[in-house]
Amino acid sequence: ERRFLTLGIESSCDDTAVSILDGQRDVKADLISSQIKDHAPFGGVVPEFASRKHLEAILPLVDRALENAGVSDPAQELSLIGVTAGPGLMGSLLVGVMTAKALAQTWHLPILGVNHLEGHLFANVVASPDLEPPFICLIVSGGHTEIILAEDFGNYSLLGATRDDAAGEAYDKVAKLLGLGYPGGPIIDSLAHKGNSEAFSFPVPLRSSDEIAFSFSGLKTAVLWAVKDLKEKSVDLPIADLCASFQKAAVEALMTKVERAVEVTGIRKVAISGGVAANRGLRNALQRKKDWNVFIPPAIRCTDNGVMIAAAAYNGYKRGLISDLFLTPNPSWPL
Ligand code: KG4
Ligand code: ZN
């Protein structure tokens, strides 16, 4: 049986990722070059620096991915190239898109530009063969906090989004003000499990509103005031308690709106994705929803990766989508 190999390329933010997928979910290669250490001294992603790092990383990654998948003649053995074309950082996206176009032209392969958010959604398709639309997907990352209704593959509507900071951004900012390092999400997550979540009562943003929307800047500010107050009293910061209390409010803010989306749509199939979907507090809260059908990808597929892009590209190509060599990145491409 002939393989259908899709080369997936992701470079929208600070990770360069290259994967090779056979069909919809058989992973043949999955590589990622993280820039976390390069950006850590700055406490966040520095766009110009990110694109230079992508440029250094991308071709060696493609070579290694081909090797891992046992592909010796890409022009003959690959069937499709999928690449993230937005949303994301323009300079970072450009490196992926230009590389993908050069390879597509060299190897005479079809190319498809993929929306990064649809990519996140497809992390669930790879992980769960039984996930069929319609379903709801909460995409929570450093750049996004959105609830999407997937009526069908390729047919998405936005049920609600954040009005200010993304959830991951709030995690990163709170970690920064607690002096915990970057990226803050995983650090706060593990400290939260050692702390008392009742120690501080932080506001759950928009809890009493019927609207499907998020706001995280007020929560971040509430943590800031609590920290200021403690510092003025010269008290040692109860870091774990602060993390636990913040995480409780953040997870509740996310869960309240997913509950609302289920109520409004009547759809009980709920998927999550994006970096914050790796959060143990959020994963546990979802797993407690016994009357929902919950889909949670493994943590490594929640954060940015190439597999999700290859999977979305494969699915789109099978639905008849195709790009050409005029493909250009769109930093604010809506889903
Ligand atoms: O999806 P992703 O890798 O990149 C973006 O597209 O943004 O998400 C990265 C974000 C960062 O803000 C990071 O702090 C957060 O996801 N994150 C977490 C956890 N792991 C990563 N936030 C909370 N808990 C975690 N375990
Ligand atoms: Zn992402």
Image: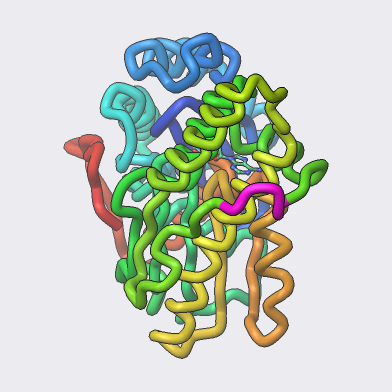
Q: Is residue 182 visible?
A: no
- Which residue: 30% across, 57% down? 335
The reply to whether the magenta stretch includes residue 12 is: no
Residue situated in front as seen by the camera: 93 or 212: 212
Is 317 positioned to the left or the right of 244 in the image?
left
Q: Position of residue 110 (x, y in %)?
A: 35, 45
Image vertical order of residue 20 relative to residue 63, above or below: below
* Magenta span: 197-201
Q: Is residue 147 visible?
A: yes
Q: Position of residue 291 (x, y in %)?
A: 67, 87
Quadrant hosting residue 321? bottom left
Q: Position of residue 292 (x, y in %)?
A: 63, 82
Q: Residue furthest left?
A: 326
Residue situated in front as seen by the camera: 303 or 141: 141
Residue situated in front as seen by the camera: 152 or 334: 334
The reply to whether the magenta stretch includes residue 198 is: yes
